[in-house]
Amino acid sequence: MNKLMQSGGDISMSENKFILKLSCLDQPGIVAGLTTALASRGANILESNQFCDRLTNQLFIRIAFAAPAGTSKETFELAFKPSVDRFDMKLKLEDLSRRPKIIIMVSKFDHALLHLLYQIKVGWLNAEVAAIVSNHEDSRRTAEQEDIPFYYWPVTKENKAEREAQLVELVKETGSELVVLARYMQVLSNDLSNRLYGMVINIHHSFLPSFKGAKPYHQAHERGVKLIGATGHYVTADLDEGPIIEQETERVSHAMSSDDFVAAGRDIESRVLARAVKYHLEGRVMLNHHRTVVFSA
């Protein structure tokens, strides 16, 4: 008899694990169709999340499940097809046996890069860094120590289009599914932002009020800001206005120096970026027009 488990359970190492993500208009019978298809293939549900946007009547579902060893991704895609056709679903199925590859881009400040590498090293982030790309040489030694290919691509107004074409080619060559801007201080073109929409995550400081330009933490200190923070978001053609994945703020005080602000900001940026990357790689983020649906663990 097939069993469907809504929460946890001991899973044999011989089983294959998958993540199912879908969106469609909310209608009766959607969940029944999915669970019936899963049960018919002997799958166990490990985690199930759903959300309906009442403004648009759009339903978002994420299901993590385990299947008997040897059950292929294609087997489940075939099982889900009747529901996909009936409800006009946008469905994506990910095989968790495959370790996702990412490209990390960085400039001079490497705190976010180092935090990502550490979280991958200790297993909190399940990813393989296919390459580190930088417009400065500062992180070459880090890449060499971690045995990660390093690409030094200085960017000028004249070669910007060429560098972005190289990045697109690198994404294809490595099979990377995510580009992480870990304090990469170059603005991507509108063309590249649109081409890689949903595949590029950026981190930036976020204050009330917002400070732009050089030394934002020093500006915040001069203005007596009481909260500093960071925002992890998908990159779009609208600078720093893409769909938000994760945010965090921290209270600061008049007793802190501008250097204290910078140190606190670096910590927040590193944590927020790592969580945003983790949510994406675990299939917990779904785009909902200019917003996101994030099913946190």
Image (tube, grey):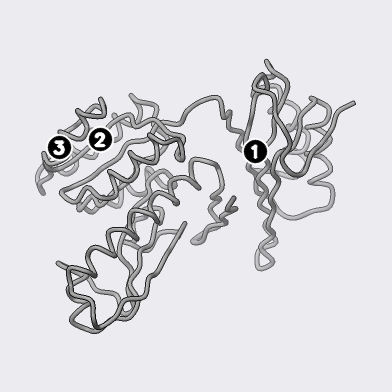
1 or 2: tag closer to the N-terminus:
1
In terms of depth relative to the viewer, which is nearer, 160 or 146?
Answer: 146
Quadrant in the rendering for residue 217? bottom left
Which residue is under mark 3? 153
Q: Secondary structure under badge 1? A: strand
Q: Secondary structure under badge 2? A: strand
What amino acid is found at the position of numbered circle 3 in the picture? Trp
Which residue is under mark 1? 20
What amino acid is found at the position of numbered circle 2 in the picture? Ile
Location of residue 111 in the rendering, given as x and y in whole percent from the top left corner: 25, 50
Q: Is residue 124 above or below residue 226?
A: above
Which residue occupies 30% across, 48% down?
A: 181
Q: Is residue 293 above or below residue 209?
A: above
Measured in 3D between alpha carbons, the distance from the residue under mark 1 to the one under mark 2, in whole angstroms, is 30 Å
Q: Is residue 122 above or below residue 157?
A: above
Q: Is residue 177 left or right of residue 19?
A: left
Closer to us: mark 1 or mark 2? 2
Mark 3 Cα shell of 10 Å, populated few (<14), some (14-19), many (≥20): some
What amino acid is found at the position of numbered circle 1 in the picture? Leu
2 or 3: tag closer to the N-terminus:
2
Direction right: furthest residue: 1
Location of residue 29 in the rendering, given as x and y in whole percent from the top left corner: 84, 47
Location of residue 30 in the rendering, given as x and y in whole percent from the top left corner: 79, 46
Direction top: furthest residue: 70
Q: Is residue 80 above or below residue 54?
A: above
3 or 1: tag closer to the N-terminus:
1
Mark 2 Cα shell of 10 Å, populated few (<14), some (14-19), many (≥20): many
Which residue is under mark 2? 132
Measured in 3D between alpha carbons, the distance from the residue under mark 2 to the one under mark 3, in whole angstroms, is 10 Å
Location of residue 20 in the rendering, given as x and y in whole percent from the top left corner: 65, 38
